[in-house]
Image (spheres, grey):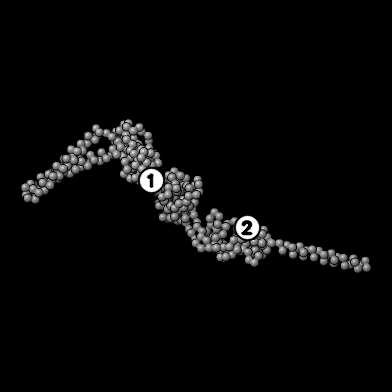
Amino acid sequence: MKKLLKAITPFLLLFALLSCTSEQSDIQNDIKIPVSVESIRPRSISSFIETTGTVYSAKEGLMKAEHGGIYRIQRNPSTGKSFALGDAVREGQVLVRIEDREFVNSLQLESKKLNLELTENNLSKQKNLYDKGGVTQTDLKNASIEYVNAKYSYENAEIQIAKLAVRAPFDGVIVELPYYTDGVRIDQGQELFRVMEYEHLLMDVKLPEKHLNDVTLDQLVQITNYNTGKDTIDGRISQISPVIDTETRSFHSILQINNSGRALRPGMFIKASILTEKRDSTIVIPKEAIISRQDGKIVFIVENGIATEKRITTGLETTDNIEVTSGLKMNDRLVVTGFETLRNKSKVSVLQ
């Protein structure tokens, strides 16, 4: 009997070991790895060239006194007060008047107006006489010369007087208004105010040489306030230099920004995203769901509780997402979390 027990003991031990291994294998096969999935739906994705810079006004005008005289700041009819910084103004609106009666009198506007009327009447009379043969052609030409000289003299006087009323050169906002006491005398050439137009802004950008063929006129640009990151407005490429800077290997472009809502101000530092390509109704997945290997990129999809490995090829990409051009199809259930420990054909439990 002892010999029999010694003979069968190794077989009993082997059977027990195999039984334990089988049980452990069954346990492992029954383990389900928890994952989160999302169904693939048609989405759009765009490719951008990112750059930053400072915006400036498309229109800016600094007005100076063209004549010396008494300074008179005008009243803003919109506020009922004197014009002030930040006031919106209309083209042609008088903001400052310069008073100089001595200068106005020296222009002799009224006498020049009367002289113009006399020369005009005389010219009309000379034309009638010339038609009847009463005067020579020389007499008619002399009358014409007198009329033209009188007309220019009167118009020049009007122009000089008009310069005493300093007007806004275009619709805009007062951004500079040096303070002068109302009623004091100022000299010719002194700065009176600066006006900027806010609704159209410009931005100079220098882009790397490699993007020269990616940028075209009227190309869409998305503008974001760099400080807040909240306001996104549209802009377009308005100018492109064909010359490459030999030192920086970059080219100069100008962006035109539609700022009708005045979300931006001249001098702000902003981010510009130049749209180079856009694709609609394509497969787009989070970059973080991709596992990169030496032989390519893979993701996992779930079918009937089993995680299946899929090799993919990619296209356009953004900071967070990427386009999949092959390897996946619409309605696939993509594993987005919990894929780190997965193997091909692993059992999974989908978290709700």
Q: Nearer the viewer, residue 149 or 84?
A: 84
Of helix, strand and loop, which one carries label 1? strand
Mark 1 burial class by Cα count in 10 Å: few <14, some 14-19, many 20+: many
Image position of 68 (left or right of 2): left
Mark 2 burial class by Cα count in 10 Å: few <14, some 14-19, many 20+: some
Q: Nearer the viewer, residue 270 or 95?
A: 95
Quarter of image, res 311: bottom right
Q: Amino acid at mark 2?
A: Thr
Give the label on residue 337, or none: 2
Q: Residue at x 19, y 38 (%)?
A: 110
For the N terminus, give its image quadrant. bottom right
Depicted 95 relative to depicted 221: above or below? above
Could you tell which of marks 2 and 1 lies nearer the N-terminus?
A: 1
Q: CA distance from mark 2 to mark 1?
A: 51 Å
Q: Which residue is mark 1?
A: 197
Q: Residue at x 53, y 55 (%)?
A: 318
Q: Nearer the viewer, residue 33 or 83?
A: 83
Depicted 66 relative to depicted 199: above or below? above
